[in-house]
Image (cartoon, grey):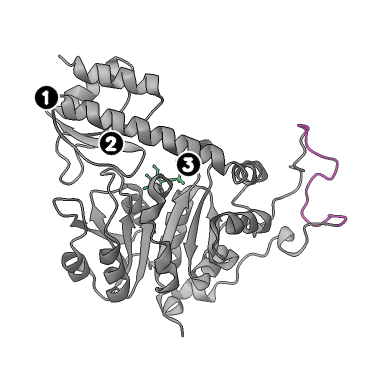
């Protein structure tokens, strides 16, 4: 039995997946899925009267060629949030297995564990928001199936050290999920190379950030092909709809525009960081490899409220572990950032 198979829940191994009509045929005189052969009530070129391809073949092929990763290592989901849920459902036995989450980090990992009745244990990132590898590993027991790491980390903005993640992949016998939702903003820190040396790593990516498609809901993961095949086994048959698939196909022809966005965001990011660092009320501004900035300010809650009253909405992260008085601001357009900077300067 492979190491992946040993980690998968027994009921998932035994599961006979639902086979949908479009698994067997995508073309022909299609009288197999109780669709409306006459068409859709809204004119469109996407044949929305027909169910989409469950294996998302064309989009996977295109993504594969754009990112240079083999087709068999790619799974596409309704945002990376869907994939987080599927991973927990494939590997973690409710009420039995557990997950370890270094914090502060993205809140959905814990929420997904709670929904699935899987215990999650929190371990603190150190003062530089890096992993304490020994501490993290010492929290793992024989029932720990998964670790959720996030790099660049939300909300702290920093990348995790590759050598630490490598050591974790080597020493931890479960699945190491590394959420790279913000990786486009500094691709050099990607952990992609670890996909070829460690079967237990899963990288999560999304079209919601640098690509500007948060509303389309599409994310993907890169992993060993056995992990990918289990994700396909448990996903809803038609998770990605044709509208989203079409938009993402078009997005993949527009990498130049994505790169332009990334460059503009990086320029604006530095401008905001500089302005915040000059501001005496701001106690600390953390470096960022993402499209947001975390900063510490006196009376964060009231600063947040005051900005909101002026129509500038940022995120109060001060209730997260070790983030007392910390606020997170997303990098916006120049005029939006100007307004944010001005509001912070003029705080009463
Ligand atoms: C670290 C991280 N992972 C995943 C997501 C969710 O991404 P998606 O829109 O692909 O579900 C977010 C969204 O903010 C995020 O910050």
- Image quadrant containing the C terminus: top left
Q: Position of residue 271 (x, y in %)?
A: 30, 28
> What segment is highlighted magenta in the picture?
28-43
**Which is nearer the N-term, disc 3 or disc 1?**
3
Q: Position of residue 268 (x, y in %)?
A: 35, 30
**Under tag 1, what secondary structure?**
loop
- Residue 208: mark: 3
Are circles 1 and 2 on residues that touch, CB within 8 Å?
no
**From mark 1 to mark 2, how far is it between C-alphas?**
17 Å
Q: Position of residue 215 (x, y in %)?
A: 52, 36
Q: Within 8 Å: ligand 1 and the Cβ of disc 3? A: yes
Residue 93 in view: yes
Pointer 3: residues within 10 angstroms few (<14), some, or many (20+)? some
Quadrant hosting ligand 1: top left
Above/below status of 330 relative to 134: above
Above/below status of 178 relative to 153: below
- Residue 144: mark: none
| Chief secondary structure of the magenta portion | loop
Q: Is 176 in front, or is 271?
A: 271
Q: Is 294 in front, or is 137?
A: 294
- Residue, disc 2: 293
Q: Is residue 41 magenta?
A: yes
Q: Position of residue 44 (x, y in %)?
A: 76, 35
- Residue, disc 1: 280
């Amino acid at each position: 039995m492979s190491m992946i198979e040993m980690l998968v829940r027994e009921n998932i191994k035994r599961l006979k997946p639902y086979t949908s009509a479009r698994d067997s045929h995508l073309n022909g005189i299609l009288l197999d899925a109780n669709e409306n052969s006459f068409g859709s009530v809204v004119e469109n070129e996407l044949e929305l009267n027909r169910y989409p391809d469950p294996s998302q073949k064309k989009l996977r092929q295109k993504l594969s060629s754009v990112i240079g990763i083999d087709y068999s290592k790619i799974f596409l989901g309704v945002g990376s949030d869907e994939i987080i849920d599927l991973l927990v459902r494939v590997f973690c036995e409710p009420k039995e297995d557990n997950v370890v989450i270094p914090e502060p980090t993205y809140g959905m990992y814990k929420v997904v564990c709670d929904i699935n009745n899987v215990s999650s244990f929190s371990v603190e990132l150190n003062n530089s928001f890096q992993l304490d590898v020994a501490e993290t590993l010492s929290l793992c027991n024989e029932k720990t199936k998964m670790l959720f790491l996030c790099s660049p980390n939300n909300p702290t903005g920093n990348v995790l050290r590759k050598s630490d993640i490598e050591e974790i992949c080597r020493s931890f016998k479960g699945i190491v999920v590394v959420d790279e939702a913000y990786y486009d903003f500094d691709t050099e820190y990607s952990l992609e190379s670890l996909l070829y040396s460690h079967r237990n790593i899963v990288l999560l990516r999304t079209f919601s950030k640098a690509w500007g498609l948060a509303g389309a809901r599409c994310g993907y993961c890169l992993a060993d092909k056995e992990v990918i095949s289990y994700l396909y086994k448990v996903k809803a048959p038609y998770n990605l709809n044709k509208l989203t698939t079409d938009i993402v196909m078009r997005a993949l022809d527009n990498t130049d525009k994505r790169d332009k966005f990334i460059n503009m965001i990086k320029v604006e990011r530095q401008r905001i960081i500089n302005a915040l660092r000059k501001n005496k009320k701001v106690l600390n501004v953390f470096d960022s490899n993402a499209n947001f900035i975390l900063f510490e300010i006196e009376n964060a809650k009231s600063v947040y409220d005051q900005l909101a009253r002026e129509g500038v909405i940022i995120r109060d992260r001060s209730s997260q572990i070790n983030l007392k008085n910390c606020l997170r601001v997303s990098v916006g357009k120049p005029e939006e950032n100007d307004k944010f900077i001005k509001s912070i300067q003029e705080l009463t």
